[in-house]
Image (cartoon, rainbow, N blue to C red):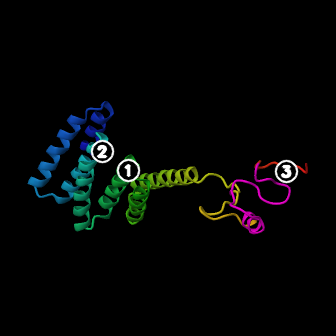
Amino acid sequence: NISGTVFDFWRIRGHWAEVEELYNLALAASRESEDRLGEARNLNNLGVVDEAQGRWAEAEQVYQQSLAIYREFKDRHGEGITLNSVALLKEAQKHIHAALGFARAAVAVLEQTEDKAELQKAQATLKRLENAAQSRNSAAAPPYVKAPVVPPLGLTPPLQLAAARHSPGPQNPRQPVGPGFSRLQPGRPASDG
């Protein structure tokens, strides 16, 4: 695939303008010759270029166009590759759960094809995303620590409520109430003197 080789040559050197120009020419040629599958492939390639330059909205738009053509022609191979491209875009945008959905779809579609190399790429994407999602979930949930029982706001803890029923006057919920405690000095035992 000569366009892929040229793409890699320019991509490695970071010459995205040249890569984009190449794929725009290839897209125009595909459209002129009414090669719809070539059009889909070049749209997907332009999506990769847009994504690499941080133009995520444009990348998503051309990926969707590519996907629509592949689905119209029931080209499962192209559909799977484009689904994986969308998964990578969503990953770059830090939309891990959306990326997971596209990666799972890519793997499911590519399993129906003969292209084991693209299937392995999609599986690698899926595994990386599953690990990222798992890391996020474990980072969001701290290790189990037994939390103290705290009554809902506005409610008095049951032991203080029971003691308050047997003590005259207004109660301070922060002050220990019960035998041996004074209301005048919270937390200190009352003196006998």
Q: Amino acid at mark 3?
A: Pro
User: According to the image, label 2 marks what residue?
Assistant: 51
Name the residue that disc number 1 marks.
88
**Residue 52 seen in the current view:** yes
What's under tag 2, amino acid-wise? Answer: Glu
Q: Is residue 176 magenta?
A: yes
Quick one: label 2 or label 3, which is nearer the N terminus?
2
Question: Please, what secondary structure does the residue beneath circle 2 have?
Answer: helix
Residue 73 in view: no
Nearer-the-camera pick, 56 or 82 = 56
Q: Amino acid at mark 1?
A: Leu
Query: Is residue 62 in the magenta section?
Result: no
Going from the N terminus, do you reach mark 3 or mark 1 first? 1
Q: Start and end of the magenta stretch?
A: 160-184
Few, some or many C-alpha atoms within 10 Å of disc 2 (few <14, some 14-19, many ≥20)? Answer: many
How many C-alpha atoms fall within 10 Å of the one at disc 3: few (<14), some, or many (≥20)? some
Depth-wise, is mark 3 or mark 1 nearer the camera? 3
Q: Position of residue 123 (x, y in %)?
A: 46, 55
In the picture shown, does residue 23 fall above or below 166? above
Q: Is residue 8 left or right of residue 27?
A: right
> What secondary structure is found at the residue carrying circle 3?
loop
Residue 124, x across and y down, in percent: 47, 52
Classify residue 177 by image quadrant. bottom right
Q: In the image, which is nearer the foreground, mark 2 or mark 3?
A: 3
Tag 2–tag 1 contact (CB < 8 Å)? yes
Residue at which label 3 appears: 189
The picture quadrant where one finds residue 119 is bottom left
- Which numbered disc, 2 or 1, marks the residue that appears first in the sequence? 2
Query: Percent from the top left, x then y, of residue 151?
Result: 65, 63
Residue beneath the point at 76% across and 68% down: 162
Task: Name the one closer to the observer, 69 or 120.
Answer: 69
